[in-house]
Amino acid sequence: RLADALAARPAHRPGAKPPPSHEEHELRAHATFSAEERLRQRDFDTLTADEWRTLRHLIRARRLPLATVRTRRLKASSRGTHADLRASARHAVRAGGDWTVWKYRAPVERKLPLVLLLDISGSMSSYSRAVLYFCHALLQSRERLQVFLFGTRLTHATRALRERDPDVALAQLATQVADWSGGTRIGATLAEFNRRWARRMLGGRATVLIVTDGLDHDECGLLSEEMARLHRFAHRVIWLNPLLRYRDFAPKARGVQAMLPHVDAHYPVHNLDSLEAFARSLCEAAPIGPAPRAATHLATHLPKPARALHTLEARPAQGDTRWS
């Protein structure tokens, strides 16, 4: 912030004359563009302190409600397709036998839960900060979101992000997280999440969002195994990768190759436009059936991993070729 403030001040030389006023007006005439439009396409890694403050207000002003799905539960409603005979009879008794007013029951709509796994290593510090502002806006609008930070260890950060001021929330996280801007151990942290948190957090068709560049320093065999296990637990797994901002991006790193077969979608997250495009995709209605397992940014069509059979009664009949 001090460097930005010093760079913004013009250098004053003794005896120098100020520039003519007509040149200043001419420069402003050529530079008539929206600062917000320019900020939307700026990379998070190149923002100044003032631009970060503007970005924080833009994210809070543009927060969108997430998609909802209909459940089998019903609630009282003034209109609907299910007639509530008991409520209608009670109203008729109070109205002296008048059955002209009917009561109905409508399906309950529920928001789908989200679980965010955010990489806070040194190469992801600027992008992690922008995603944390986005998560703070979602939590302030009371969305079903759980946030986990990982670098060399796993940290549950949902409680700290419930603070009303995002800067105060990030300051509390900086004191709690010891591995901020450090190394990356994606496989080990995913193993800890699958062992401690997966069964509690990934129920009810939960979607897992992984924000990382995929540059893992551990053995990639562990990463592939834990990604496959996470894919079996979650309803959908979405990977947000800032490296997709490059047009010539190719999955050459071993960590990227280990993660790609186990994700449902692969999106960029490097500026405000990409973050808002991903937020709009979350606002769309989710499909009722199982999520497709073959939609990635790199057109990687891979089959869904087979789930384990937990019942011994489901045995194949003799001569049935469907189980071969």
Image (cartoon, rainbow, N blue to C red):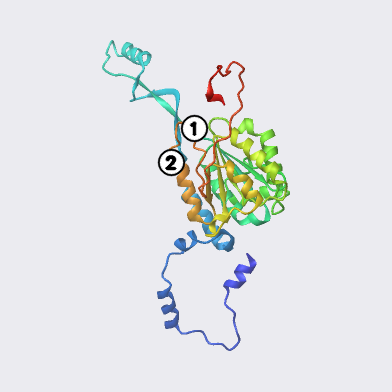
| x and y, in percent, of residue 121 in the image | 67, 52
Q: Is residue 148 visible?
A: yes
Label 2: few (<14), some or many (≥20) within 10 Å?
A: few
Give residue 237's quadrant in the image.
top right
At mark 2, the secondary structure is loop
Of badges 1 and 2, nearer the viewer stands 1
Q: Is residue 89 left or right of residue 155?
A: left
First along the sequence among labels 1 and 2: 2
Residue located at (62% from left, 48% from top): 257
For the residue pair 131 and 252, the one nearer the viewer reads as 252
Residue located at (61% from left, 45% from top): 259
Label 1: few (<14), some or many (≥20) within 10 Å?
A: few
Residue located at (66% from left, 50% from top): 254
Q: Is residue 64 left or right of residue 149?
A: left
Q: How many angstroms separate mark 1 from mark 2 (CA)?
A: 16 Å
* Amino acid type assigned to the residue bearing label 1 in the image: Pro
| x and y, in percent, of residue 69 in the image | 45, 32
The vertical placement of 116 against 128, above or below, is above
Which residue, as the protein is rendered here, is positioned at the far front? 319
Circle number at residue 284:
2
For the residue pair 79 and 6, the one nearer the viewer reads as 79
Q: Is residue 154 visible?
A: no
Read off the residue under disc 1.
290
| x and y, in percent, of residue 222 in the image | 70, 41
Give residue 287's quadrant in the image.
top left
At mark 1, the secondary structure is loop
The vertical placement of 290 against 313, above or below, is below
| x and y, in percent, of residue 6 in the image | 62, 72
* Amino acid type assigned to the residue bearing label 2 in the image: Glu
Q: Quadrant of the C terminus?
A: top right
